[in-house]
């Protein structure tokens, strides 16, 4: 019985047995690299403070409800306009704050100051807006002193108008 013995690296079985551990090591290295080089941008460092501040936000929304405030927001091109409405006689502020929070990435969040427009109604506010990403947006509208607050959400560009009422 004479036969030639081939070296191990020319046999298929060692390679088949090694392929899964090698793929696991490469996949683990890729996951470590992704974890180190990317930032999710979703988690806030001050989540505890935000949890404590929820009562303040609720009281500001109740004040908006007591004042009978509501708003209509519309986005057209690179302009955003908000019309404040109230079922009571109120003097509207000169400017309002608009916070647009992107649902999945904090890096896209926008904070805008809207000035009262020089139109017949003193409750229309306008501002320029650029780079509004497609997706789900959370809206928070408040006066400069942060005494009242209205909030809602919309999907851009599907929704170009939003009616915001106290919740």
Image: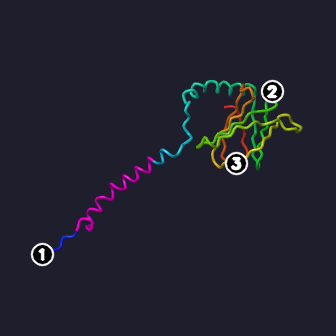
Q: Comparing marks 1 and 2, which lies closer to the viewer?
A: 1
Left or right, 83 with respect to 108, comes to right
N-terminal of the two: label 1 or label 2?
Answer: 1
The picture places residue 102, in percent across and down from the top left corner, at 63, 42
User: Label 1: which residue?
Assistant: 2
Which element is circle 3 on? loop
Q: Give the alpha-carbon distance from disc 3 to disc 1, as whole Å.
A: 77 Å
Neighbourhood count class around disc 3 (C-alpha, 10 Å): few under 14, some 14–19, many 20 upward: few
Residue range in magenta is 7-32
Neighbourhood count class around disc 2 (C-alpha, 10 Å): few under 14, some 14–19, many 20 upward: few
Left or right, 49 with respect to 13, comes to right
User: Label 2: which residue?
Assistant: 88
Neighbourhood count class around disc 1 (C-alpha, 10 Å): few under 14, some 14–19, many 20 upward: few
N-terminal of the two: label 3 or label 1?
Answer: 1
The picture places residue 53, in percent across and down from the top left corner, at 60, 25
User: Label 3: which residue?
Assistant: 131
């Amino acid at each position: 019985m004479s036969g030639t013995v081939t070296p191990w690296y020319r046999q298929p079985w060692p390679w088949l047995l090694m392929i899964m551990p090698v793929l696991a090591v490469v996949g683990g290295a890729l996951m470590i690299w992704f974890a180190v080089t990317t930032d999710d941008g979703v988690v806030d460092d001050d989540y505890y403070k935000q949890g404590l501040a929820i009562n303040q936000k609720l009281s500001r929304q109740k004040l908006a409800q007591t004042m009978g405030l509501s708003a209509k927001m519309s986005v057209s091109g690179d302009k955003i306009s908000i019309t404040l409405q109230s079922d009571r006689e109120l003097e509207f502020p000169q400017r309002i704050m608009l916070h647009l929070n992107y649902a999945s990435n904090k890096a896209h969040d926008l904070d805008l100051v809207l000035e009262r427009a020089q139109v017949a109604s003193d409750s229309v506010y306008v501002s320029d807006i650029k780079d509004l990403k497609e997706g789900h947006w959370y809206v928070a509208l408040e006066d400069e002193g942060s005494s009242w607050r209205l909030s809602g959400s919309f999907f851009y560009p599907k929704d170009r108008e939003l009616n915001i009422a106290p919740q």
